[in-house]
Image (cartoon, helix red, strand yellow):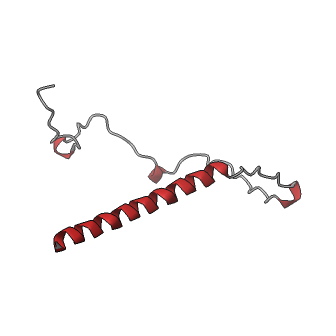
Amino acid sequence: MGKSRSTTWIMVVGVLLFGGATVVTLRTAEQAVAAPTRVPQPVPASARAPQPVAHPPPSAPEESATIQDDPTVAPDPAQSADHTVSFPTDI
């Protein structure tokens, strides 16, 4: 008798929780659809922030910023990201 009462109470509490969550979700969705969209008002030219001064690009990149690749050196297969990838054979 005691086990069936506790099971009943667990079921009642669960139904109430799920019902409450459903009501909250549906009300939020209804309010999102019913809410009017706001049209942004144009900002007057006097209220706009001044534009930052654009600097000219550098004449040449710095030597330390340039990465030189050596195409004659083969990559090490042990450092490859896919050296341990196995593919299924029954495709």
User: Camera-side residue: 84 or 64?
Assistant: 84
Could you tell whether 46 is left or right of 80 in the image? right
Q: Is residue 78 above or below residue 23?
A: above
User: Camera-side residue: 71 or 24?
Assistant: 24
Answer with the quarter of the image where residue 68 lies: top left
Of the 4 image quadrants, the one containing the N terminus is: bottom left
Could you tell whether 57 is left or right of 15 in the image? right
Residue that extends furthest to the bottom in the rendered view of this protein: 2
Residue that extends furthest to the front in the rendered view of this protein: 1
At x 13%, y 31%, the residue is 88
Q: How many numbered circles does the render carry?
A: 0
Could you say where residue 6 lies in the image, as x and y percent from the top left?
23, 71
Could you tell whether 7 is left or right of 32 in the image? left
Could you say where residue 50 lies in the image, as x and y percent from the top left?
79, 59
Residue that extends furthest to the left in the rendered view of this protein: 89
Q: Is residue 18 above or below residue 59?
A: below
Could you say where residue 71 lies in the image, as x and y percent from the top left?
31, 34
At x 56%, y 52%, the residue is 29
